[in-house]
Amino acid sequence: MTATFHSDVHRDRASTLDPTRRNGIVYATPDGRQLRADFYAPAGPGPFPVIVALPGGGWLAGDPAGLRHWGEFLARNGLAMFAIQYRVSATEKTFPDPVCDALAAVQFVRGSAQELGVDPQRIGLLGASAGAHAAALAALAWDAPRFANRPPANAHAGVDARVKLFAGVYGVYDMLAHWQHEIADFPLASGRRSECFMGGSPFVDRQLYFDASPISHVRHATNKLPVFVGYGTADAVVDPRSQSEPFLRALRQAGHVVRECPVNGAGHFWFSEEHIEEAQSSAGFLAPHLLRFLKRHL
């Protein structure tokens, strides 16, 4: 086992399954920067199905610790989770770096399956908000020229990066539509996160916005990939009418197995709620639907 696995193992004493957590696993080192992940696993030897998870953060931040409650919840229910840090910036273009980081994480998990105690044939991708954007692109467009052969430096760069499913929660799936939505909220370009992330407006490079949109990569060739899409019906940050709903229509038209989970009256930011096992919370409403989808298709 490599040195990157030498991290603290935490126990969840509240659970009879006693899941474990390993913090700070280095999964890739692009340009000398160590990217880390937190790993959650059920008790026992495995191998377990595993979810590579990307937190949200508006392309400005992305702390895997924000997914701790989901890691513990999934581990108590028989699934492992590998929650990753990925490259973000408040001042410069980072696309397509988060997508490449997601692919590198899948490769690391598959290449390290024996050490982690996971099944290399049962890997899925999960993301929230900006994390759902990167995860969707990694799941649908892993072989696209924009992303192919571009994962950051890691010991598993030659490993297959395909996954068995994708689950997204209030994600951005159409970059041009999201940019147009931002114009209403941020008339000054300095306030538009998508322009910072993309390195300019679509008037500078419209093709880049097309390539950066998961909806552009929905095709018959990928329709064996089951997809879960959750969103709040009152989300004013990532408008489901221009994001989740058109994405779902495209997926169905292409023949994907799709599970839609609208959360009535919910806005944004609720996926990181702590009380995900309480049905009255937005995350608590979504949790059993997501769990059933993961167990059925992973």
Image: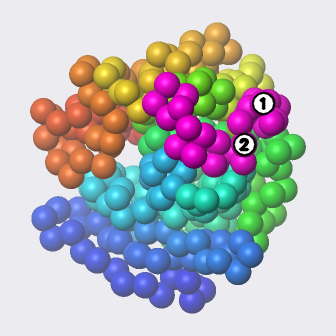
Could you tell me which residue is drawn at 46 percent across and 77 percent down?
24
State the extent of the magenta-drawn residues as a range.
183-211
Q: Amino acid at mark 1?
A: Phe
Q: Residues within 10 Å of mark 2 (few under 14, many from 20)?
A: some
Q: What secondary structure is marked by label 2? A: loop
Name the residue nearer the viewer: 206 or 156: 206
Is 196 inside the magenta-drawn segment?
A: yes
Name the residue nearer the viewer: 295 or 222: 222
Name the residue nearer the viewer: 194 or 158: 194
Residue 112, percent from left and from top: 61, 70
Q: Which residue is mark 1?
A: 203
Q: Amino acid at mark 2?
A: Gly
Is 56 inside the magenta-drawn segment?
A: no
Q: Which residue is mark 2?
A: 200
Q: Is residue 219 left or right of residue 33?
A: right
Could you tell me which residue is drawn at 75 percent across and 19 percent down?
220
| Figure quadrant of residue 149 | bottom right
Residue 81 appears in view: yes
Could you tell me which residue is drawn at 52 percent across and 43 percent down?
191
Kindly check if marks 1 and 2 are in contact, taking CB atoms under 8 A apart as contact: yes
Residue 64, percent from left and from top: 42, 62
Q: Residues within 10 Å of mark 1 (few under 14, many from 20)?
A: few
Taking 25 as reference, is 131 above or below it?
above
Q: How is the image coloured?
A: rainbow
Taking 283 as reference, is 106 above or below it?
below
Residue 10, percent from left and from top: 29, 77
Name the residue nearer the viewer: 262 or 82: 262
Residue 178 appears in view: no
